Image (cartoon, grey):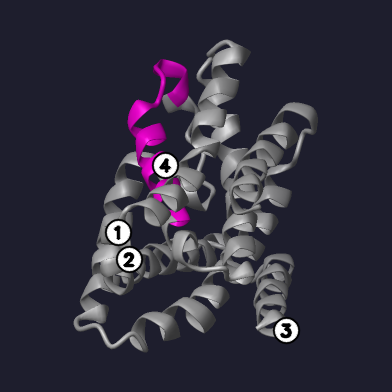
Amino acid sequence: MTYLALILSVLVGACLVFLVKLSNNIVKLFLSFSGAYLLAVTVLHLLPEVYSSGSKNIGLFILLGILIQSLLEFFSKGVEHGHVHAELAEKSFPWLLFISLSIHAFSEGIPLGKTEDTMLLWAIVIHKIPISIVLATFLLHSKLPKLKVFLFILLFALMSPLGCFVCESIPLFETYQAPITAVIVGIFLHVSSIILFESSENHTFNYKKFIAIGVGILIALLAN
């Protein structure tokens, strides 16, 4: 169920690009909602979990996750929070962007390997749909044949299930579950907070995005 949900979230996002012409504003609203929901689930569920584990230096591992995500975003150009730089894709295939985004997706699947937290699964699924929309849009601008675009999207769709599978299969992930989860918490905090900080252009109030953020947090609170 977990694997299928993660794969379908990417395929749904890609299909929306191929079949429906979504406006940039709709994608940004969905991104704001998903970022708020991911942030709320991280704060309400993952943070208490890692701090209650009794492991030392949890805060340092969270900060490490923030630094790792900052490095990944240097190569991905901010696709994780909705940035599209189509002119880069037109020059050549964005290998660094694709690899860094795949590493990010792999890390998202890791905490799902040792938990049956449905809220966390849905937070990641909802977060992946707008990211997949942006990635599919980017790949289409790369002027690759449609078949290759689909294959790259399918490869990306397998990254989170792969992270989940690796976590389930390798004992090391269970031994160091709390520190590893803390790193993922840092990644989630960085991505979701950037989405929210960038939700208002030119520092102007956008009530639609504010409502989307509020709804995302409210749903997480009600499901808690």
CB within 8 Å, label 2 to label 3: no
Mark-to-mark CA distance, 2 and 3: 30 Å
Dot 1 surroundings within 10 Å: few (below 14), some, or many (20 or more)?
few
Q: Which label lies toward us, 2 or 3?
A: 2
Residue 33 to residue 131: above or below = below
Closer to us: 54 or 68: 54
Queried whether the magenta region covers residue 183, the answer comes back as no
Mark-to-mark CA distance, 2 and 4: 25 Å
Secondary structure beneath label 4: helix
Which one is earlier in the sequence, the residue at label 4 or at label 3?
4
Q: Which mark is residue 171?
A: 1
Q: How many marks?
A: 4
Residue 64 to residue 42: above or below = above
Q: Position of residue 140 (x, y in %)?
A: 58, 22
Residue at the spot of label 4? 101
CB within 8 Å, label 1 to label 3: no
Amino acid at circle 2 = Glu
Amino acid at circle 4 = Leu
Q: Which mark is residue 174?
A: 2
Queried whether the magenta region covers residue 97, the answer comes back as yes
Which one is earlier in the sequence, the residue at label 1 or at label 4?
4
**Which residue sits at x=32%, y=69%?**
177
Which stretch is magenta? 89-109
